[in-house]
Image (cartoon, rainbow, N blue to C red):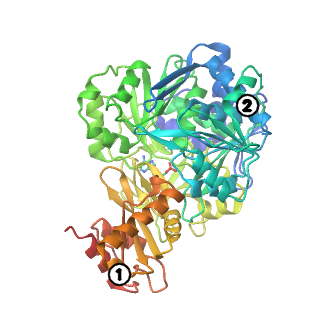
Amino acid sequence: MTKSTYADFYRRSIEEPDAFWAEQAQLIDWQRPFDTVCDNSNPPFSRWFVGGTTNLCHNAVDRHVATRPDDNALICVSSETDEERVYSFRELHAEVQCMAAVLQSLGVQQGDRVLIYMPMIAQAAFAMLACARIGAVHSVVFGGFASGSLASRIDNAQPTVIVSADAGSRSGKVLPYKPLLDEAIRLAAHQPAAVLMVNRGLAEMGMQAGRDHSFEALRAIHIHTVVPCVWLDSTAISYTLYTSGTTGLPKGVQRDTGGYAVALAASMQHIFGVSPANAAGQTYFATSDIGWVVGHSYIVYGPLIAGMATIMYEGLPTRPDAGVWWTLVEKYQVSVMFSAPTAVRVLKKQDPKFLKAHDLSSLRALYLAGEPLDEPTASWISSALGKPIIDNYWQTETGWPILTIANGVEPKPSKFGSPGVPMYGYKVKLLDETTGQELAGANQKGVLVIDGPLPPGCMQTVWRDDARFAAAYWSSIPGQQVYNTFDWGIRDEDGYYYILGRTDDVINVAGHRLGTREIEESISGHSNVAEVAVVGVADSLKGQVAMAFVVAKDAAGLELPANALKLEGDIMKVVDTSLGAVARPSRVFFVNALPKTRSGKMLRRAIQAVCEQRDPGDLTTMEDPAALQQIKDLLKPV
Ligand code: AMP
């Protein structure tokens, strides 16, 4: 195919999708070729590369072992424990087969779920790849989540085995995982057949006889076991990954096998500029966590499918000093780096000498995603690094960028504040919120939606809940079956899009997506809470922080500031232990009533506007204006 301009490339993906994606599918190995590129006969459930069989682990590991077994594959660095270990493709192949054999010895079969609750250590990647190898469905739960979040995910995923470790570490502080896991299993209705524990020697594990197994002991038995890849239907489920929505119950985003492999392989080439011809010797460094979608797509699968090395990093960007990431870029000749604006804002507060002290000549570009990239942050890092900064907008649901610049197809200038233009395969539109009419003109704010079928790699459905998938994502605009991103957007005269925040109750704290409803449910668990509203409020470092407004059952006692302070601390502890510190509100304010409409709907957008010193808009339907006024008064600077 001739690659002329990106406009041609994009047009072809929309007008001739079968031919376009059949070509992209050549970037991966198939055991049996597919006979249908896209079956969209039952929308919104589209099926990609039907009839084909393949395997994600084969594409990420085995096929490279055949050609360059000794090249770096997985580079694990912990600035917390000062450990560093490089696995070649050959070594990764052996470890993944071993982990697959260990999982099989614990009863895992094709289609079974394996829940992975782990810090950023090599065994987490081994476990993901081992599941892919044997056709088990992995469900990684972010290690920062606590027992309550973990329990609801265990109940939804119903795993045969849970893989975990004794502890993670953050800023030098050991964070034991096993007590949280034990408590989550105690809370859950579903009981896993086995728990596999990796021992890092950081914390006590309190093994439960009959249920808990030592990874090290089983590894010693299985380290030389050969476990072939199982050839899976392209449409077989590869994984589920929970994400927050508008209800308290997280959604299991379910992904396929072949479509995901093709989407990642194509994105590595067209977006990140890594082709099969130039992958050897290149290193990718995504600073995210395997608990998030970026970790799945661009720490584990994407770079390995492309045949480049990938860095898995445990630690902060500032420890032992703010040069730690740049030391890795220099040492491992990182060519592509992927991070989040929050991390850059943290680095911006540090001495710039740490950036200057390293040879960053290998680095081609820094990609940022997960939250809006503000202009000052983008300008600072762009001039500090002297490299292109490429924003990219996407979601757990899509698995790869919706909006960015495909420099691998045709270099195009970025515009600060805009992630870029629609990626090939995505039919992006803006709709008027109330009428559902398409906003064809420039500079009009609307809801960003995508016409079906979504391109390969996007979610197949909500795990075990097709009805929720159809209702939550595809039926929100009356009379139209379009995929709703639940983000506001604007398109300028040049076709560049700008993302203006969520249309729903999802918030984004330091790039972590959280549901305010989940936080509200957790706070409601405190015995002195009658009612609560949680909103996301703009924050200069974290993008947004959660703030809680609580009506206490015993309001009289709170007149004493010490009592109010204690209750605020207790409520924060409740969130810490049920959801994890990541979801802890930055402040809890006590109010007499919450602002609601006359029909009882909570006016979260009005509360948020007041918190951000913005106009709360039309309040004619508000039941009790004093409630909003009290929030205004509480937030007045003293
Ligand atoms: P997640 O599913 O955790 O990746 O979060 C997805 C949400 O994060 C999106 O719906 C957006 O609200 C936000 N988001 C992700 N990337 C960007 C970006 N580059 N610019 C603006 N918002 C973003």
Helix, strand or loop at mark 2: helix
Q: Inspect the image, locate mark 2, and give the three-letter code of the amino acid beneath it.
A: Ala
Q: Mark 2 points at which residue?
A: 100
323 in relation to 188, above or below = above
Q: Inspect the image, locate mark 1, and give the three-letter code of the amino acid beneath it.
A: Ala
- Relative to the observer, which residue lies in front, 40 or 573? 573
Residue at 66 percent of width and 24 percent of height: 95
**Percent position (x, y) of residue 611?**
31, 67
Tell me, for residue 206, which label it has, or none: none
Residue at 58 percent of width and 49 percent of height: 179
**Percent position (x, y) of residue 104?**
78, 34
Q: Mark 1 points at which residue?
A: 627
474 in relation to 99, above or below = below
Q: Nearer the viewer, mark 1 or mark 2?
A: 2
Helix, strand or loop at mark 1: helix
Quadrant (top left, top right, bottom left, bottom right) of the N terminus: top right
**Percent position (x, y) of residue 441?**
40, 58
**Percent position (x, y) of residue 572?**
43, 62
Determine which quarter of the picture holds residue 383: top left
